[in-house]
Amino acid sequence: MTDSLQSPTKFDAFDLLATMVAVVQPDGECLYANAAFENVMRLSRRAVQRSNLFDWFADASRLSDTVTGVASNAYSSSRFDALLRRGTRPYEELVPVHVIVSQMDSDAQVLVELIENAQQTRQDREERTLDQVQATKELTRNLAHEIKNPLGGIRGAAQLLEMELAPTEMGPELSEYTQVIIHEVDRLQSLVDRLLAPHRHAQVVGDVNIHEICERVRSVILAEYPRGLQVQRDYDTSLPDFRGDREQLIQAVLNIVKNAAQALQSRIAVGDACISLRTRVARQVTIGKQRWRLALELHVEDNGPGVQAEIRDRIFFPLVSGRDGGSGLGLTLSQTIAQQHQGMIDCESVPGRTDFRMTLPLP
Ligand SMILES: Nc1ncnc2c1ncn2[C@@H]1O[C@H](COP(=O)(O)OP(=O)(O)OP(=O)(O)O)[C@@H](O)[C@H]1O
Ligand SMILES: [Mg+2]
């Protein structure tokens, strides 16, 4: 290895990137690898930098030809898909990546960027979720107001009608109908109130501890499901407090945990239902379009049947429910609360493992 490149400070900015970046010589010798590369490969930087980048690829010749081509100025950049080898045999794992090879200004060095396909898919999904939530939020709010306005009038008119009809012969019979009107109006009213709820209350901001929130939610849910449900916790206690609205965040987490418990009904009946609350630190995360140096992740994982495929892409939409008697507002409210804290919630679900992840930026 070239001595002058032992501590290549000119590459330091690459550590801020979420994608993997390596600088190599035309023969593949790795002169530099950034922090994301280290993380994905689960190796120390020294180990990566002492190696030949081509050795990390399932099809080394493709990369080696491209690097040679770019280094010799045959073309200035090139992209292709490849498989990155992670771990050592027999535990080797192949990670699908998109590779971008570009020229650097100097010394026949070549810049190799690697984007994990899984990361790309997840990022696309997150952006789509945020766009969708944004688009529906306005519509829901306006619609809820429009519905709310005439409800008072309808209820009042039904009551007047009932009073007018009461003394007549048909009174008692017809009051059944007016009661239906009043009852349905009240149901709509409470639905509309829930739709408008997240926008109505001003945030009450104070110091919040994520584990205190988890513990509160845990005790509420265990009180509701005292038998057959285990709620495990796996906390990273190094997580600092942050500023936020404690009550709202409890509500946000409770909605997610409640859904998990509801999805676990049949396992609760046999006694092997499990929800786990896991907290972790995350570095250099992008939420929406914003980049944060530090964030916390709360995973709510359950061993239930998974989110039904038909609604999987839409569960954060208002009024989308896969449950009898569900109003489809719980996750919308949780997502809104997370966003009011500059965070977001996303979900990965397969039968047997559903993971809701709430990411909140830390100071
Ligand atoms: N952990 C989970 N496992 C399986 N399905 C889930 C899970 N969490 C949510 N879902 C699905 O997502 C749907 C939407 O959830 P959401 O909390 O928004 O509404 P809801 O639970 O139906 O009604 P509400 O919470 O308003 O009473 C649920 O009806 C359910 O089908
Ligand atoms: Mg719910």
Image (cartoon, helix red, strand yellow):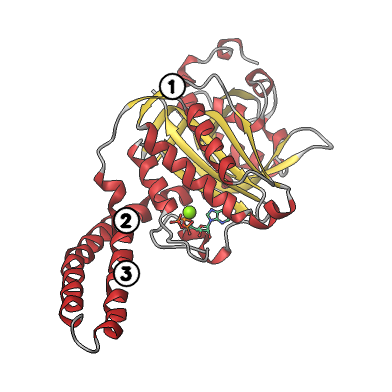
Whether 183 is drawn above or below 223: the answer is: below
Q: Is mark 3 within 8 Å of ligand 1?
A: no
Mark whose residue sits in front, 2 or 3:
3
Q: Is residue 82 left or right of residue 147?
A: right
Residue 114 visible somewhere in the drawing: no
Query: Mark 1 highlights which residue?
Result: 241
Residue at the (59%, 12%) spot, across then down? 6
Instruction: Tell me the crowding category of disc 1: few under 14, some 14 to 19, or many 20 or more residues within 10 angstroms, Cα based.
Output: some
Whether 85 is drawn above or below 137: the answer is: above
Q: Is residue 43 left or right of residue 331?
A: right
Whether 336 is drawn above or below 54: the answer is: below
Whether 164 is drawn above or below 185: the answer is: below
Q: Which mark is residue 183?
A: 3
Location of residue 92 in the rendering, given as x and y in whole percent from the top left corner: 77, 38
Q: Secondary structure at mark 1?
A: loop
Q: Secondary structure at mark 3?
A: helix
Q: Secondary structure at mark 2?
A: helix
Q: Is mark 1 within 8 Å of ligand 1?
A: no
Q: Is residue 13 left or right of residue 157?
A: right
In what quadrant of the picture does the C terminus appear? top left
Of mark 2 and mark 3, the one earlier in the sequence is: 3
- Mark 1: amino acid: Asp
Query: Mark 2 highlights which residue?
Result: 195
- Are the residues at dot 2 and dot 3 in contact (C-beta closer than 8 Å)? no
